[in-house]
Amino acid sequence: MDLISQLNRGTQEARARRDALAEAIEEIADGFARLGLKPWKIGWKSPARVDMKAPDVLLGDRAEPVAKILRYESAVNILSAADQLRGFAILLRAEASLMGAVSVARGIFEACLWATAVIDPTITTDERLQRALTRRLARLSAGIRLKDMLGGGVTDADRFIENDGTVDDEHGSNRDPAKDIDDIVSYAKGRGWPVTRGHRTPEITRLSIDWLSENLERRIGIERYAWTSGSSMAHGEHAADTASWVELSQGLGTAPAWLIQLWSTGAWAGPRLFLATLASYTGKASLDHEYQRFEKLFWNGGSKI
């Protein structure tokens, strides 16, 4: 009876830790959504303030502030991370899919890394702008490819909702993406920036998850592991313990939260890196309380019950 009582108590404690972590993840997701939709608080001597004073970018027949470009390209990925964090919390609570949770954690890390790259305070305004315009070229090209594959029956899915509920059409939602690509390429060449032909789209500066995970200033060593472990897991290169659980889970229909946490470090490493970079870029800390709670629960909840 004592053994049964201990098992039941351990199960209840494990579920309580799981649910507390899921709540903390949802809290971080809500915070990311606010960061993606509302203006950032900016310090007077911050790199963000420097970007606000930079000359406008002339793209065809319109001018766009540098700070707005950087903010938008970061916000697209911040909102993507928020959405995926909510999905990760759902999968964690369900404890039904190890690989599903690992794949979503990989997506969280990737979205956070892109959001971080375009506001990196350790590089110049021009270098940040090159990264942001390269990311915009990738998005515009993706919209064209999707439309072509679906036979032209959809509009560009890159739609951004402003705070008042209106649609922002400056970034491709109801524009001609091919013309916007040409405008960006012309602007880059006019600045003397080399434009190369990438695998799928023109590139002003070469960017990749592998390179960024090794070269961003505020990494602490786990970022490349978080990316490569999640990436290999998502593509079928399973470690011995996960292979055993994937096989066992088919009969049990469950994947314990501690195992999901073990192989989902990207869900922690991505937000950590982005929030540290955002604080340095703007001169103002964001989501301090929410992140500290999330980090504590993420690393204290891994006991195997």
Image (cartoon, rainbow, N blue to C red):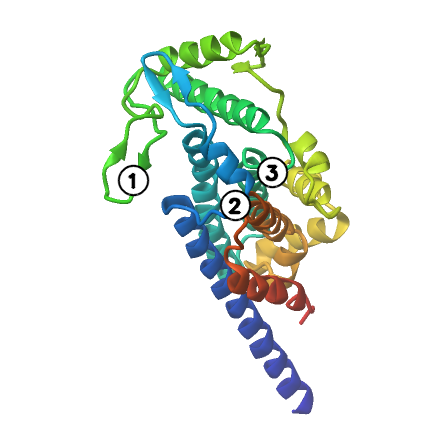
| Residue at far bottom of view | 1
Q: Earlier in the sequence, mark 1 or mark 3?
A: 3
Q: Amino acid at mark 1?
A: Glu
Residue where numbered disc 2 is placed: 282
Report the residue at 29% width, 40% height from top. 162
> Within 10 angstroms of label 3, few (less than 14), some, or many (20 or more) residues?
many
How far from the left and from the top, in percent, is residue 78? 47, 43
Report the residue at 56% width, 24% height from top. 126
Residue where numbered disc 1 is placed: 162
Q: Earlier in the sequence, mark 2 or mark 1?
A: 1
- Eyeballing the image, is 178 above or below 87? above
Report the residue at 64% width, 68% height from top. 301
Residue where numbered disc 3 is placed: 121
Q: On the rendered structure, is 223 left or right of 111?
A: right
**Residue 120 versus residue 241: which sits nearer the camera?**
120
Report the residue at 49% width, 45% height from top. 81
**Residue 259 versus residue 41: which sits nearer the camera?**
41
Query: Is label 2 or label 1 in front?
Result: 2
Label 2 to label 1: alpha-carbon separation? 21 Å
Q: Earlier in the sequence, mark 3 or mark 2?
A: 3
Q: Secondary structure at mark 2?
A: helix
Q: Secondary structure at mark 1?
A: loop
Label 1 to label 3: alpha-carbon separation? 26 Å
Q: Quadrant of the N terminus?
A: bottom right
How far from the left and from the top, in percent, is residue 145? 42, 17
**Residue 291 versus residue 300: which sits nearer the camera?**
291
How far from the left and from the top, in percent, is residue 193? 58, 12
Q: Amino acid at mark 2?
A: Thr
